[in-house]
Amino acid sequence: MGKFDGVLLVSDFDDTLYGADMTVAPVNREAIRFFVSEGGTFTIATGRAHPTFAPHARIVPINAPVILSNGSALYDFDRDEMVYETFLPDRAREDLQQVARDIPEIGFEAYHHDDIYIYQPNAVTRRHLLRAGMDAAEVPIAAMPLPWSKVILQQKNDVLRRTQQYMLQRWGEEYEVIFSNAVLLELTRKGSNKGGMVDYLVQYLGIDPKKVYCVGDNQNDIPMLARSAIPFAPSNCAQEVKDWGAQILCSCQEGCLAQIIQQLDRIY
């Protein structure tokens, strides 16, 4: 028995736990170890897909399935098995061909199982793949195999905001179209977001929803912050998260996870 029995803490990965220097702050690592040792359940909810997160699956003590692909997948790394997964409708390939015709600057990555296919890679694409340490195949959209777990649209922020509006106006009933940072626009099946998968995980684990705490830094984290007993965000978060009303902590690299666990230590 521990003081955090029955408490679930879910953290975004990039720029919340994993810093721009591609490390986890030691104070965060130690705090998570303490949280888990006292019976807490800790996991990650990331926009990264299985192949891009798998190298980091042991970076801190994680003792529950991980939410991947911006809420499209739930993967148990201890058992090395997929718990639950959703896919974009097959029509996404045709819809993205239309997007590419009408917004010719756009580029994207499409995720098919553990393979990544890219269309019109740009500087954002290259930086993103380099940070993830992944290779991708550049092929015409029509030749990309289905199904896709998610797509990441990539360009300058103004182009992506225009793309988001374009897609939601035409196909808002089909897709989640949400930013994971200023130059990455995530496309998943409607209802497949971090909040929905937190709900699924809570049921899967038998956790009391009132004992769920989430932290994230960007627009794609807001659906899970809405499920959090106290919604947390690092100080480096997007302005949209601040405006939404999350409790702002120190930055990712200064140890925002440690601050959360200090608060939970006082609560429990």
Image (cartoon, rainbow, N blue to C red):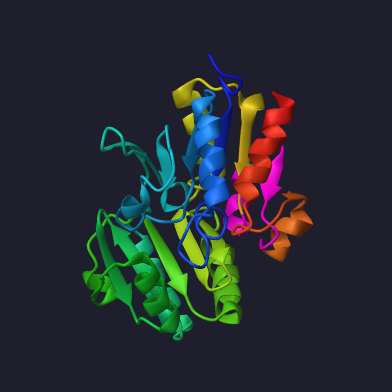
**Residue 171 x %, y %:** 51, 60
Q: Is residue 190 above or below residue 209?
A: below
Find the magenta span and give its range.
217-237
Which residue sits at x=54%, y=81%? 156
Q: Nearer the viewer, residue 109 or 56?
A: 56
Using the image as rendered, state which of residue 163 and residue 9 is in the foreground.
9
* Image x and y of residue 222, in percent: 64, 50
Residue 227 visible to an observer of this rendering: no
Q: Residue 239 falls in which quadrant of the image?
A: bottom right
- Res. 7 in view: yes
Residue at the top extreme? 1
Residue 218 falls inside the magenta stretch: yes
Q: Residue at x 70, y 43 (%)?
A: 231
Q: Is-magenta flag for residue 189? A: no
- Which quadrant of the view contains residue 110? bottom left
Q: Is 143 positioned to the left or the right of 172 in the image?
A: left
Quadrant of the frame with the C terminus: top right
Q: In x, y percent, where is residue 54?
A: 32, 51
